[in-house]
Image: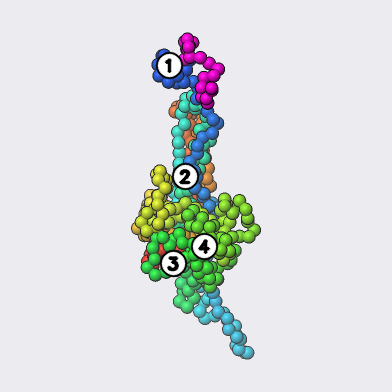
Amino acid sequence: MAYPGSLDHQSSTNPAQLTNLGQSNLAGDTRALYLKLFSGEMFKGFQNNTIARDLVMKRTLKNGKSLQFIFTGRTTAEFHTPGNSILGNDLGAPPVAEKTITCDDLLISSAFVYELDEVLAHYDLRSEISRKIGYALAEKYDRLIFRAIARGARKASPVSATNFEEPGGTQIQVGTGAGSEADAYDSAKLVSAFYDAAAVLDEKGVSMDGRVAVLNPRQYYELIQAVGTSGLVNRDVQGTALQSGNGIIEIAGIQIYKSMNIPFLGKYGTKYGGTTGVTTPGNTGDFVEVALEDASDASTGINNDYGTAVEFGSTSCGLIFQREAAGCVEAIGPQVQVTSGDASVIYQGDIIVGRLAMGADYLNPAAAVELHVTNSAPSTF
């Protein structure tokens, strides 16, 4: 009777003397010499979405080191008395103020590709290295722009003339009372904070057009899970699109994005442990839960003030803003350059250089709202 796995079609009596063509020096792995075929795919590091430049005011800088933005305040109105001459108001209104955004130094990222390595390799790394360089540049300024928006939410208006001061930025606690870091992930408390922010923006005269929010991924997915009961979903988007894209959910007319580049509890994008209630998934590498770095105007290469890590604090947990909240000036857009000619001959390879020259800062503080946990709001800097 045959059983599964039995040798019904072969015999072990007097077996052939097998020559193992894949074995090295008649010893070891019998497949050691067989070719490892390249699948045609490379596992790419997951890239964080870089979205900030498209959500704020962007201007091209040419023939100058900075751009000036002019603010005009409000004036008053009164009824005319017959016979009186109209000579303008004696207060000199409306007041005028300025905000200047300076271009930071040239930001670069580079790699050297040795020509012999390219010849011997059975896959193309050059294009992938170029993309990674571009991602590094974009990620840097995504983070700086979000820091500029948060700074604006803590500031008073540039228009500060007596009796004509314009509204400034807003900070809103997610939750109430003493609070904890876990409040940042509570969908009900987030929704309440969103409606508070929408009301504040309305009260301060900020346009409905271009209102957005940027949260971290876990906050975003907490809200997605609540759409069935809270009516948060944008009804123009249904099905699988609800699960996949950015900017799908709206609360109070505020379109919501997710990003790993926002300041979040003293880190970029996420924080594990503490009182967050979020356990680390493990194996997060060196690019997840990255601590905020010092990026004040005293830092090398930085000409705008994005704040130090200490100044930024550890309670910020999301941003709600309208596009006038911040601006970025771009002198040199993201570019990738590759050496050629004599330089390639001397070094027998090519230097791939990515470069970007831009700067960012807050513009209209009234259009910026910073969400924070606990009753200790981040301080102004």
Asked whether residue 161 appears in the rendered view, the answer is: yes
Q: Nearer the viewer, residue 60 or 176?
A: 176
Do the residues under discs 2 and 3 have CB atoms within 8 angstroms? Answer: no
Q: CA distance from mark 4 to mark 3?
A: 19 Å
Is residue 372 in the magenta section? no
Residue extending furthest right? 236
> In the rendered view, does 25 fall on the left or right side of 245?
left
Disc 4 marks which amino acid?
A: Phe
Disc 3 marks which amino acid?
A: Gly
Disc 1 marks which amino acid?
A: Ser
Q: Position of residue 303 (x, y in %)?
A: 42, 54
Q: CA distance from mark 4 to mark 1?
A: 65 Å
Q: Which mark is residue 24?
A: 1
Q: Secondary structure at mark 2?
A: helix
Q: Which class describes the residues within 10 Å of circle 3: few (<14), some (14-19), or many (20+)?
A: many
Region rendered in magenta? 1-20
Q: CA distance from mark 2 to mark 1?
A: 43 Å
Residue for badge 4: 321
Q: Secondary structure at mark 3?
A: loop
Q: CA distance from mark 1 to mark 3?
A: 67 Å
Residue drawn 56% across the image and 63% down it: 229
Of pointers 4 and 3, the one earlier in the residue sequence: 3
Q: Which mark is residue 136?
A: 2
Residue for badge 3: 175
Do the residues under discs 2 and 1 have CB atoms within 8 angstroms? Answer: no
